[in-house]
Amino acid sequence: MSNPQEEQDLQKFLRDVDEVTNLIQGLNSADPSIQVKAIAETEKRLSSTKPKDGSKKKPQVDRTVVNTRAPDLPNHEEMMNRDGFMAALEKDAEERARRRKENEAFANALKDKGNDAFSKGDYEAAIEKYTEGLKKQKDMPMLYTNRAQAYIKLQKYDQAIEDCDWALRCDEKCIKALFHMGKAYLAQEQYRKSRECFLKILEIDPQKEKLCKGCIDEVDAEEKRQREEQSAKEAFESGKSAAVSVSQLLEKLSAPDKTPLYYAGGMRLLTEAVQDGTEQTLFRTNNGFSVINDNEVIRRLLRSETRSPADVELTLSLLLLWQAVCKGNEENQRFLLTHPDVNLHLPTLLLSERPEIQEQCLALLCLYAETESGRSLLVRHLDTTKWLQLFLSFLKLSDNRARYAMNLLTSLIAEDKFKIQCRIKLSTEALPLFTQLLGSVETLNELALAQCIAVMGDLCSDVVIHLQMAESHECWEACAKFVDECWVEGKITRYPKCLHAVLGLMMNLSLQHSLVIQEFAEEITQKCMSLVNSKEGRIVTRAIGLLSHILPVSLVALEEAMKQGVVKKMIKFLKTGEEATSGYALKTLAACVRNSRQAQEQIVKSDKKCSTFLKLLRSQNDVVVGNAAFCLGKCLEVPGMATNLLDTNVVKILLKVAGREAEKTQAQENAAIALGKLCNADARQVSRLRELNGMAVLNAVMKHVQH
């Protein structure tokens, strides 16, 4: 009868052999995911056989041998010993690791060769190299995703999806695999699966929100296009009159060598036939853009600079037709702008000598500007580097062209690429034209000019444009003169909308400190101090806002403001003004007390207990609290001010602000400084602080201020 312990050891040994056999099979598997799992299990098993000190465990000889030949085991005596078997396995694993490292180097070299072929457009060669690399390294996700991208270029979408699936087996969070899989599904019109891929990317990495949104928008647009085309097809097949008319008219317009008036008449009829999205889609699916744009008569027309009456009629008919088929239809808009002749010649129609052609061309462009995708198409496919000065020039006109031009500019400013293009000719062409417009206000439409000024202000969100305009002497001079045109003898005589816009522009420009601003600071201060007496609340708010930007950078301007009673006026607005006005008034007071002892004394004289500042310290607006604390701290430099506050709860209010449990802000720092000045000026305030257990809070904040 065998020893129970020996029998137990044998069974354990046999189980080990089975496990190792399974591991070896996994290592040799063709499935990369199984292979990766087997490698991990092998490394885990090997690590468990090593001593904790990291040294290699020497095989221990077990003198007790139950059987010299176990069934189904290799015919090697040392394999009958468990430790010997594990040592052999470890040696095999080390050899595998060495070979894997070599294969990885080969695979990377082949990947680089594949990438080189891909960049040259040789997708077949790229696939061949990636495939060779996968023979060396089957669990390399990048080889699968790169090959998938090449398959997509060759429109082999099933193979691309399969490769992306393999990459995800190797790495379930492989974003590149999900991206290419989403694109392949989109090409196969499997919209739900495509959308799921991009949503999965967003789930893995929320930072990819912009990328995923663009991809999902593309999926939505393609799905919408498919639905529209199917609906249009059904309408045509059912004999819907408008749908049939579109097809018949396009057939007639395809006839060559007809007169311009023949084509013009046909286009007018076609424009009337396009009533909704169905007819718009039929126009596109029946090659409407090619039928018309490839017509030799029309192509000649687009290239011509001089036009007969018949040519003018044909051009107008063409522009009106384009408006009809593109209104609200992103796919048609893309088709039109990507047509080579249209892309090349449409901008030249803006320069036509015929006002009606310019107007309809602007109307067409405005259709694009209504949507984000349309604006992107305009900026991407047309040369818009001269559009700013071109559209500004339309402002001199008294018809719809000025309105269309300003609407276009207002919309296009939302595109960063357009603002970058505006930089090119801003100083040399756009700014001189703008200053000229400000000087000829009597001949312009007030609403259009106000919109134009607002456009220039919005352009300042671009740092390069902001710098160019802020350092333009001519721009500041034109703005200052314009204020004088509108504000005469203490009242607004005309152009209130334009005055409001100019003050907003000057506020924007004054954020960029420059020598030019210093030159105009005193003059601007005089104008602003006069404007705060206006009965127009919007004008007052912007005048005070401009003051709050100018006074901190110019002592000369501050002296001028003090002469005109700025402190008294700002305190009045603090008490009676609406939120924006009082906020700017507080910033203006902060600029005054920073550099003027006289301003500090005037505030204390008008409000001995600084009750207005104490009230503002309770605001939820951190900027307001910070400025109020700063002003209070500066006023505490006036002798006797701290004593005036003995019967108030100033210590408690300041301590509450300074002790906020949040990242240290300017409001906390200013409150702590004010507390320090308060306690330093009157020892009785220290007792109050101790009663409220505020010394620790004050010390902590002051340490932060010192650092």
Image (cartoon, grey):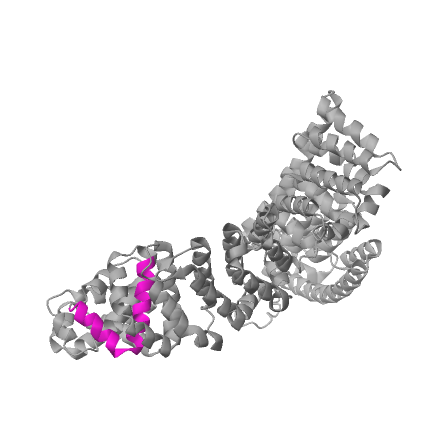
The magenta span reads 581-608
Using residue 512 as the reference point, say whether residue 173 is left or right of it: right
Q: Is residue 625 magenta?
A: no
Q: Position of residue 537 (x, y in %)?
A: 34, 54
Residue at 30% x, 77% y is: 703
Q: Can see residue 177?
A: no
The quadrant holding residue 58 is bottom right
Residue at 75% x, 29% y is: 246
Task: Compare residues 472 and 365 and report the one nearer the observer.
Answer: 472
Looking at the image, residue 334 lies above or below residue 493: above
Task: Compare residues 638 and 42 and report the one nearer the observer.
Answer: 638
Q: Is residue 604 magenta?
A: yes
Residue at 17% x, 66% y is: 650
Residue at 86% x, 43% y is: 296
Q: Position of residue 374 (x, y in %)?
A: 63, 47
**Predominant SS along the magenta part:** helix
Q: Position of residue 476 (x, y in %)?
A: 49, 69
Name of the residue lying farthest toward the right: 257
The quadrant holding residue 668 is bottom left
Using residue 543 as the reference point, say whether residue 255 is left or right of it: right
